[in-house]
Amino acid sequence: MSERVLAAGGGGVQVGEHPTWHVWGLTINADTVISTALAAVIVVGIGLYLAAKASSGVPSKLQVAFEAVTDQVERQVQSNVGIRTAPFVVPLAVTLFFFILISNWLAILPHAWEQRVGPPTADVNLTFALAFFVIILVHVTGIRVNGKHYFKHFTQPYAAMLPLNIIEELSKPITLALRLFGNILAGGVMVSVLALLPAAVSWLPTSAWKLFDLFIGLLQALIFALLTIIYFGFAVGDQEDAQEEGAR
Amino acid sequence: MSSYNLAAQGGGNIFLIPNATFFVELAIFLIVLGVIWRYVVPPVKRMMNERQEMIRQQIQESQQASERLAQAEARYSEALAQARVEAAKIRESARADAQQIRDELREQAEQEVARIRERGEEQLATQREQVVRELRGELGTLAVTLAERIIGDSVADEGRRAGTVDRFLDELQGMAAPDSAPQEDSAPQEDKAPQSSSAPQEDSAAEAVSVSPGRRRR
């Protein structure tokens, strides 16, 4: 039924359609790049403003928010990874959280601008970029911290589990990327669907949905950052087990 | 179903496959990460640590302050207790002083009383002495006069008269001496003295009279 509605909408709902640039034979999604750049500028701008204004005295509300996130991330990293083992996880997770949060929240921009700016996380290109970057860093950290022992965990608890473990490791970045992408894309599709309603009616569900979308955006940013920390924890946690085994 | 829609409109674009945008996105994210990592997180973390340090210090200071307060309170109550003890001591000593002063005053007063009484007795004794001396002078002549009047004869013989008077006075003295030993009954003694002195006086007079007939008989 929705198919008919979509079809009848005269191309009202387009999924995965992007205006593209072609550079050196490569296809680049123009709207995603613009949106990402916008999100990046916002995040960097807020961050630099914060760093310039930061004080050890009474903090601004922005600083309090940033500190709350940093504090929480530090706590998570401490309990999952150990700050000393991988101190760079803290700024990474903080950056991921804020960058994804701002990217997701670009969804509040008017639907009519969709062709130019929207949430860039609704494009797999950004989410895959983030997820692969994170996973590669996770494996690099695991190898650097554990050395050869790192590969042992692929055969845990039994050697027969090797294929499953490999699949699990491969699925990590994909699930990480697609979870974020799917949630944000769905939010945009929902708005597109609501936009097919007459304008006199559509404003109410659209407003309500966009508010909910903000919540989803926050949640997904949180999940992405948290999973990043947890993956680092897995990679590094094996090292402790290995060392314990070695000690025995 | 949506893929059908997409296929119809987008020309077979499978949007789950990333394209070259991936690298642009990655680059943008790395820039953001670099900036946040290098320029934002460290100062904010430093501020957080400073604030934590500050708060820790403040907590410490407030603990110290409360400790000092408790100490001051302890000192205060101690001083209060000491002051109470001292006050009690002072009160006690004041009471003792008062008792002592009272005792002293009482003793003094008693001494005074004793002294006054003594002096009064002395005075009394002197007076009695005087009275006796006067009596000694007068009684002789009086007795002689009386005797002369009674016997009608002059007892002018100096030797006999003096003997009689002396005997009488000795008797008088002998009667008065035991009475004067208890000092408290000085007033009754004074009352008694004239009586006792007057009785022997009459007796002696009677004796003298009774003697006289004997002498007259002779």
Image (cartoon, coloured by chain):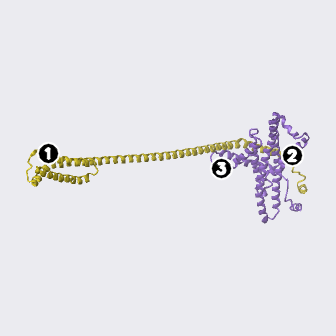
Kind of element beneath mark 3:
loop
Identify the subunit bearing mark 3. Answer: A
- Amino acid type at circle 3 is Ser
Of the numbered discs in the image, which one, if any, rests on residue B163? 1
Residue situated in front as seen by the camera: A130 or B150: B150
User: Which tag is nearer the camera, tag 1 or tag 2?
Assistant: 1
The percent position of residue B185, horizontal first and vertical second, equals: 28, 52
Share a chain, discs 2 and 3? yes
Write the residue at 79% across / 51% down.
Answer: A220
Query: What is the drawing colour of chain A?
Result: purple
- Amino acid type at circle 1 is Gly
Residue situated in front as seen by the camera: A22 or A75: A75
Question: Do tag 1 and tag 2 residues touch (Cβ < 8 Å)?
Answer: no
Write the residue at 26% across / 54% down.
Answer: B188
Identify the subunit bearing mark 2. Answer: A
- Residue underneath mark 3: A60
Kind of element beneath mark 2:
helix
Question: Marks 1 and 3, how far apart in space?
Answer: 140 Å
Quadrant the N terminus of chain B occupies: bottom right
- Residue underneath mark 2: A171
Is residue A35 shown to the viewer in this render?
A: no
Circle 1 residues within 10 Å: few <14, some 14–19, many ≥20: few
Question: Marks 2 and 3, how far apart in space?
Answer: 41 Å
The percent position of residue A125, horizontal first and vertical second, equals: 83, 47
Residue situated in front as seen by the camera: A218 or A77: A77
Chain that the image shows in yellow: B
